[in-house]
Every structure is written in structure tokens, then in C-alpha cells.
Image (spheres, helix red, strand yellow):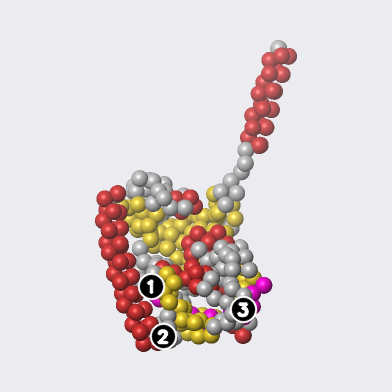
Amino acid sequence: MKFKHNKVAYILLSLILIFSCKEKPKTYQGYSKQKDFYYKLISLGDETKKTDSSQCLLISASCKTLADSLFWDTKHNNNQSFFITKNSPVFLKSIYGFSVGDSLEYLFPTQRFFKEFYNSPIPFFCTKDSCVKFSIKIIRTLNTNQFKAFNDSLTTFINQQRDKEVVQIQDYVTKNCKLVNEFAANAFMEKTKITTLDSVKKGKKIKLFYKGYFLDGTLVDYTPNNWAFEFILGQEGQLIDGLQLALYKLKKGEKAKIILPSQLAFGEKGSSNGAVPPYTPLVYQIEIVDIN
């Protein structure tokens, strides 16, 4: 009888230990934790239409700072279409299992967000934010054939945009440049000051002044207050791809005009702050101040 009581006590103790050691769900201001991000359900849609990873999900999306300042959304950025597929990043695929019409809000680590969505460093308006608010609504599901048809039409649209950029850039170069070199496809450089000093090399600390313009001459970006931009060339996320390529052609003290197609600038998404629209070629005025 004593043994039976001990056995029951042992079983009860074991159960208590098992349940007490289970990790409780972690939450933050109504958000639930999943791996290295948080999310919460904002509103419900059609609960009969559950999604799964065999489908492609058309969504509307928006990005905000922690202070709820909107800096990008699918509605106002050339009506961009945003899809989630089985090849999307893990944290986006977590939306599978929710229903068409459901709305969710995510908190993503800021550095990871800008690296994976824009391949860029954290912009000034998010430097003090630990997370970015990323809101999603599932609009509809597409099967494989429907998604392929959409991609085919999108490919046609992208090719049309690139052909349009070729004409725009060639027209700009003809009217505004004298001696240019094409250093990448539809990307041109005209040196306006030449030196025989040290060449720009990977791993060197570079100081430069820059101004960025649309092809019509509208100023969109520049080094503020006459402070040189300083960075290590080759480090990921420091510069857009076109400027990285162009700098290797320059020396200390040199100045250049650099004309870039959108695929070497801010691409099909445009800049994260909305200043540069999708599929927009740019012109940069660059001066290499120092190389260390």
C-alpha cells in the first residue's frame, strides 16, 4: 500500500515537472512570438478559405516605423503586386494557414528587414527603431498556372520598362555628356576631373561627396551639410550596386557623372523612403575626397 502511494506521488510529481517546464507562449503588446519575429491577427476574413503552401498568395502590404509613419505600401507604389510563395523568406511563409481576407501585422528586426527587402542599410528614419511594422492582408490565392500567367505578364512589363529606360538613358547621354564609358549594361560614366592618385580598391575606407538626380535634373539625394560620406568599399549594404561598380573605376580626387538604370539603382521596388519610384534611372555626381 505504501508502494502504491509512493508510485502515485511519483507520477503526480513527474506531471507537475513536465508541465512546469513547458515554455509558455511569449507575447509582446498583443503580438505573439514566432522564431525571431512577432505577429498578431488584426482582422478575420473568410475562415472557410484556409491557405496552404501549394498556393501563391496575392497580398496587400505596408511598411511603417514603430511610430506608425508609413514609408512604403503596395497601393501607392505603382500598384505593385506582392506575392508570397513557397520560395518566400521563412517569416513571410508563416502566413500560410491563415484565411483569405485575414489581416496581420508583423514586427521584423529592422536590420534584417532592410537587408532582405531592399538589400540596403537601415535608412535614417528607422535607425532608432528595433523593429519595422509590416502589415499584410491576404487578397486572393492563385494556383500554379494562374501564378505562371501572372509572371509571364510581369516579365513582359519588366522588359517594356527596361526598353523604356534604355531609350531614356541614351537620350540623356546624347544631350548631356561628351566623353562617356559604358561600364555595365546601360550604365555610363563621364569623368569630369581626372587625377593620377591612388585608385579606389575593395577594403579601402572611402570618403566621397555625392548628389543624386532624376534624369530631368530633380535632386533626390545628397551628402548633407557638406559632410563626406565615409564607408568601407565592399561591405554589404553600403551603396547601391551601380555606385559600387562605378567607384572601382575612379581615383582619389576624381569627379564623375554616373548614369544608372534602375536595376543597378533601386530596382522594381524603388527606394525604401519612397523618394525614388520603381523602375527609375538616376544620375549621380560623385567626388572621391579621400582613400585610406
* Label 3 sits on residue: 197
Residue that lies at the very extreme toward the front in this rendered image: 196
Q: Which of marks 2 and 3 is nearer the N terminus?
A: 2
Q: What residue lies at 43% left-to-right and 77% top-to-bottom?
A: 181
- The main secondary structure of the magenta stretch is strand
Direction from residue 81 to residue 288 in the image, left or right? right
Q: Does the magenta stretch include residue 280?
A: yes
Q: Which stretch is magenta?
A: 278-292
Q: Is residue 169 visible?
A: yes
Q: Is residue 284 above or below residue 54?
A: below
- Residue 177's tag is 2
| Residue 195: percent from left, percent from top | 58, 82
Q: What residue type is labelled 3?
A: Leu
Residue that lies at the very extreme toward the top in this rendered image: 1
Q: How far apart are marks 3 and 1 (CA)?
A: 28 Å
Query: In which quadrant will I find the C terminus?
Result: bottom right
Front-most of 123 and 60? 123
Tag 1 secondary structure: loop
| Residue 290: percent from left, percent from top | 64, 78
| Residue 112: percent from left, percent from top | 55, 59
Task: Nearest to the eye among marks 2 and 3: give it.
Answer: 3
Q: What residue lies at 29% left-to-right and 69% top-to-bottom?
A: 160
